[in-house]
Amino acid sequence: MLSRVANSLYWMSRYIERAENTARLVETSLQLLLDMRNLDEEHVAKQWLPIVQAAGDEEAFSKLHPKATGAAVTEFLVFQPENPNSIVQCVNEARENARMVRDQITIELWEELNRLYLFVNSPEARQVWKQSPSDFFSEIKSASMHLTGIAYATLLQNEGWWFTQAGRFLERADKTSRILDVRHQTLPPRGLPGPINQTGVLEWSAILRACSAWDAYKSLNGADVHPVPVTKFLVLNEDFPRSIRFCTTQLNTALRRISGVPDGRFVNDAERHAGRLLAELQFSTVEEIFERGLHDYMDDLQIKFNRIGGALFDAYFFLSFAAQGETDFVQQEEQQQQYAK
Amino acid sequence: MLRHYKPNGGFDEMLDKSGATRAHYQKFRGLLEEISPDDFSQRRRSVDLSFLRQGITFNVYGDKKGAEKIFPFDLIPRIIPAGEWAFLERGLTQRITALNLFLHDIYHDQKILKDGVIPPYYVLSGKHFRREFVNFKVPQDIYIHVCGTDLIRGGDGEWMVLEDNGRCPSGVSYLLENRRAMKRSFPRMFESIGIQPVEHYPQELLKMLRHIAPGGVADPAIVLLTPGAHNSAYFEHTYLARQMGIDIVEGRDLMVKDDCVFMRTTKGPRQVHVIYRRIDDDFLDPTVFRRDSVLGVPGIIRAFRQGNVSLANSIGTGIADDKVMYYFVPRIIKYYLGQDPIIPNVPTYLASEESDRKYILENLEQLVVKAANESGGYGMLMGPKATREEVAKFRGLIAADPRNYIAQPMIMLSQHPTEVAGEFEGRHIDLRPYIIYGDKITIVPSGLTRVALRKGSLVVNSSQGGGSKDTWVLYGDE
């Protein structure tokens, strides 16, 4: 498979996953605020800033918006063209990558992604958003799930497929770690947290909802919500499709299917880092996580995910990125205007 | 539905001079009457939507936001009876045969120049004449593998060749998609009228690409080389690659080692044997042509010269669709085949011939002037519609560089009923059939009918407000 094609498939599914996660994160935060009363400006900012941090774009945000109000944060995370990770930009990027590998994906997958692209860029999208944010988010979420389903149902499960899997699960693992980290300031920096109050329960429930984990969590733990079982569930659970361990398992499998190298060995750093991380998650306890401190632990995980992404690039994609000026590129592609003949 | 249709004068494809429906349009008209206007516009909307959803769009240059547009598609098909198509097929086959012989000759012995049939100056000064390729043998001696020849019909319905596109003609994906859209919208018509199919175009194209593979390669790796996703024809590139089941590559995906071409894959380099390139000569190899090209592949021309990779179309075919060379095509046909052209040229004047130049400059207001190597409706003067300033500008341009200009009388292109805001009006059309030259010459029975949607306009290019129609070639004559 062409390296460039593998790269585009990887990013296509990463961006779809990113859009969906951001949609869930923003939606649950909006829902959460509905349950809180008498919030002054400072408290509002306290609720919203961590959401921006979870999306990993604090610096870009503060350049564009002086205050972390609900309107500013949602605009930034949903529509803002200057934010490369806003939902609309993620959809645009996913679609652009899909366009570059149009011959490698199925018509069903392409049409659904193109439909989502046309929707988020239409005036209608803003209207839906104004009238009912939750309708808007369910559109994004269901489109993303629809896309995942179509991919499962129509794509050849060949090498390219495993690149889409790698992209999807690396992104999902990273986002789960960021969402889980949203309320770390309410926890002691080290050691197991004690009992939490009503607001705390609402906040940690919102975290579960933002990971679409509410139902799965409840079936295992009942309705008691506390940071420790929530963390155990979202990090270490073996079977929940959005837990960090589950995602790392899938990522590790994808990497091995790409190279054909069995577990326990490696031929590149992506496999080495992923395999090591998986072993760590398999043999860790939630007590160890809190001993280290939730925030530190999540920070460290994110560094590891970045390292795996970087190693993947070096191992498979680097070849096709010779040092070429991107602007020359676009200009000459356009100059080749053949249809107009 | 077409009851109120009134032609605007000139040759009408559907109605004869007396206003009666021509025989080959009668079945279609009958079936169209069974569709209510509401139903018809419903079908049109669903076609537009499906084009947009599928991303069957082209890019408009220099337009960053909303850069993609759907190519306007008109639901009233253009119909050609079998007998007339057979005539066109003969004419196009004759023309591409002669053009290939011509290219072979000017890149080898140059007999046609030595015999004084074409003044050597015109060939040797051609912008697209590649002197580096003189005495180079191309695989199977084929130069133009895919040709899109633009045909028009004049005031009496007589067919003429307007130009030959022998470099990388595009548009065939629209032909194929238009047909799919029509079959979805009017399945019953296809059952009862009898229309020749077009779906085999990608297979024919692939067969041709296999045919030109370097000798001794049993299972050649074939790729389509695109300038990239920002190119206006990118949809077509991915479409054809997908239909043929071959890889689509950009220049950066390829590399040359030991005069062989390889693609960069996740499993290391893999050799490529045939390249259907949709990049112009100039950009193909920065070590040979434009040095600043980042779209091409350094060393690819050497690999081609060594016979390790085949290219379609070949290098240097542009000289054959130079508009000045067009003037000589009837002579070319006569010289190599000993025949008169089956489909004639549009009468043409060469600005570099003194008597012609005099005539051109005296009659600029009546003529269409074209630059020798421009396309897409650019670099053109439509004398009868031009302002005084435009005419004066071209007078200067022609005087300064006569080799670069030709002039033709303005041809009133044939017109065809076309939907305009819910009504049917006559609009001017042309036709671009696609000719594939492999182990034999294949012309898929259809073509891209382009239509000038602006009232009275004679410019059908998509960049200038043109749309397209499906083109039906019937099994019979009615």
Image (cartoon, helix red, strand yellow):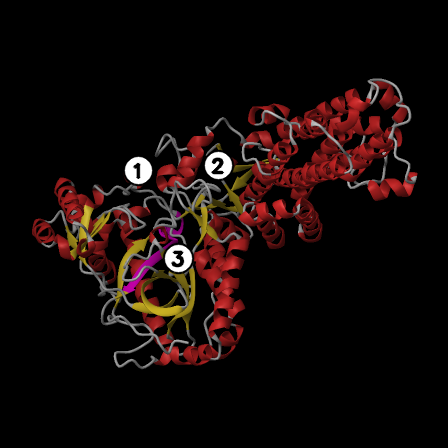
As shown in the figure, which amino acid type bears the numbered disc 1?
A: Glu
Q: In this view, does B59 lie to the left or right of A186?
A: left
Callouts 1 and 3 close, C-beta under 8 Å: no
Q: In this view, does B96 lie to the left or right of A24?
A: left
Q: In which quarter of the image is residue A293?
A: top right
Residue B124 location, x and y as percent? 21, 42
Instruction: State the separation of the CA atoms marked 1 and 2.
Output: 20 Å
As shown in the figure, which amino acid type bears the numbered disc 2?
A: Cys
Q: Name the residue under label 3.
A: B437
Q: In this view, does B255 lie to the left or right of B446?
A: right
> Magenta segment: does it hold B457?
no
Quadrant where the N terminus of chain A is found in the figure = top right
Q: Mark 1 points at which residue?
A: B132
Q: Which residue is drawn at 21% across and 58% down?
A: B335
Residue B219 location, x and y as percent? 55, 49
Instruction: State the separation of the CA atoms marked 1 and 3.
Output: 24 Å
Same subunit, tags 1 and 3: yes
Instruction: State the separation of the CA atoms marked 2 and 3.
Output: 25 Å
- Tell me the tag on residue B260: 2
The residue lying toward the viewer, choosing from A188 and B55, is A188
Q: Magenta segment range? A: B139-152
Q: Which residue is drawn at 49% across and 42% down?
A: B229
As shown in the figure, which amino acid type bears the numbered disc 3?
A: Tyr
Q: How crowded is mark 3: few (under 14 residues within 10 Å), some or many (20 or more)?
A: many
Helix, strand or loop for disc 2: strand
Residue A303 location, x and y as percent? 71, 23
- Above or below, B401 against B236 in this view is above
